[in-house]
Image (cartoon, grey):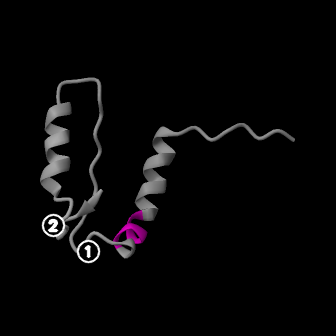
Amino acid sequence: MGSRQDTADPIAYSEALRAAARNTATAVDAYYLREGGHNQSTWERMLPWVFHWLGRYVTPPAVSV
């Protein structure tokens, strides 16, 4: 996850990770915002997508009654 404007953690880093994982058992998902820097407000805008992503990969614990 990141922003296309983030110079502290550029998209090239995550794209390199995705490229390295190609043809392996490792899945790499990427989500980028068009705008936003390396800051809290950018992460807050990504939260809905984060929870959607987590819901695909993490099974909630069983609820005991």
Quadrant in which residue 38 is drawn = bottom left
| Three-letter amino acid code of the residue under disc 1 | Gly
Q: Distance between the residues labelled 2 and 1?
A: 10 Å
User: Could you say which is closer to the camera, residue 38 or residue 32?
Assistant: 38
Quick check: 41 above or below 50?
below
* Residue positioned 77% across, 41% down in the render: 63
Is disc 2 surrounded by few (<14), some (14 to 19) or many (20+) residues within 10 Å? few
Image quadrant occupied by the N terminus: bottom left
Residue 14 within the segment the image draws in magenta: no
Q: Name the residue under label 2.
A: 7
| x and y percentages locating residue 20 in the rendered image | 15, 33
Question: Label 2's element?
Answer: loop
Give the residue at the far front of this rendering.
Answer: 8
* Residue positioned 19% across, 40% down in the render: 18
Residue range in magenta is: 42-46
* Residue positioned 29% across, 29% down in the render: 26
Quadrant in which residue 2 is drawn = bottom left
Q: From the viewer's perspective, is 60 left or right of 10?
A: right
Q: Mark 1 points at which residue?
A: 36
| x and y percentages locating residue 47 in the rendered image | 44, 63
* Residue positioned 72% across, 37% down in the render: 62
| x and y percentages locating residue 58 in the rendered image | 52, 39
Image quadrant occupied by the C terminus: top right
Is disc 1 surrounded by few (<14), some (14 to 19) or many (20+) residues within 10 Å? some
Q: From the viewer's perspective, is 16 left or right of 51?
A: left
